[in-house]
Amino acid sequence: MNELQLAQWLAGEFDNQEQAMADPTWYVPLKLWHRPLPHRIQGKIALFAEQSNTLALDKPYRQRIFVIEPSPTSTLYIQYWAFKNPSQFQGAGANPALLERATEDALEALPGCRLEVQHLGNSYKANPLPGDRCCFTYEGKLRQVVLGFEVSATQFLSFDRGVDPDTGQSLWGAMMGPYTHHKRQTYDVVIV
């Protein structure tokens, strides 16, 4: 599999305008940024992800890092990382200069938040590893998210769902199917 192609397809600015207009009950209008980091994390290509409701672009949220991990078997993995202090990087989707400070010291890997990537020809699909639970603490509470996506050269489908860690009940996200984001702008992935 080609980690550079995966990174290039992930890199860009996306929105789900058509989907939100067609089904506003289940899909809020989102803008999504995937910006390549100006440096690698543990020697691997990494991208910053952030999203915002298009009605409140000044309040972006869900800052995270995707680290693309190759393996000896040619399988690719995506490891999610979180910021130790996310407010320092809020708005980096629109203001990428903030990412100069996104060094490994500012991050922590999220246990159980790793996806295995399959190449499907015209897309890459990433699914959680069997038995993994992606949990983290936010505002003093244990949170869980079921991660997953499919990406092509022109769109990004997000299967992310927040779930109650005790009951497994869906709380937010792709409860009625994936969020379908169309790429509006491409960002170049520069290998350093």
Image (cartoon, rainbow, N blue to C red):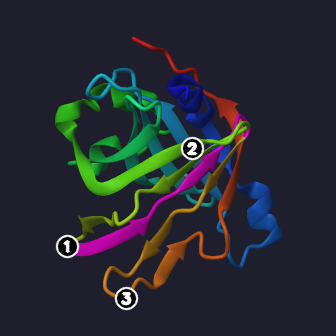
Mark number, residue 140: 1
Hey, which residue is sitting farthest bottom in the picture? 167
In the rendered structure, the answer to whether residue 109 lies left or right of residue 164 reads left
Look at discs 1 and 3 and give the one toward the viewer.
3
Per the model, the C-alpha gap separating discs 2 and 3 is 29 Å
What stretch of residues is rendered in magenta?
140-154
Q: Which residue is mark 2?
A: 118
Give how far across and how far down residue 173 sits, in percent: 55, 70
Is residue 21 shown above or below 169? Answer: above
Q: Where in the figure is residue 183, as x and y percent of width and height?
A: 70, 40
**Residue located 57% across and 62% down the image:** 159
Give the amino acid at mark 1.
Gly
- Determine the main secondary structure of the stretch shown in magenta: strand
Amino acid type for the residue under numbered disc 3: Thr
Judge whether residue 58 is colored magenta. Answer: no
Residue in view at x 23 percent, y 75 percent: 141
Residue 49, percent from left and from top: 46, 44
* First reached walking from the N terminus: tag 1 or tag 3: 1
Q: Which residue is mark 3?
A: 167
| Element class at badge 3 | loop
Does the rendering let one see residue 94? no
Residue farthest toward the front in the current orientation of the protein: 73
Instruction: Residue 149: say if magenta.
Output: yes
Q: Considering the numbered disc 2 on the image, is that residue within a helix, a strand or a loop?
A: strand
Q: Is residue 10 in sight in this rendering?
A: yes
Tag 2: amino acid: Gln
Q: In the image, residue 9 lies at what x, y percent?
A: 62, 33
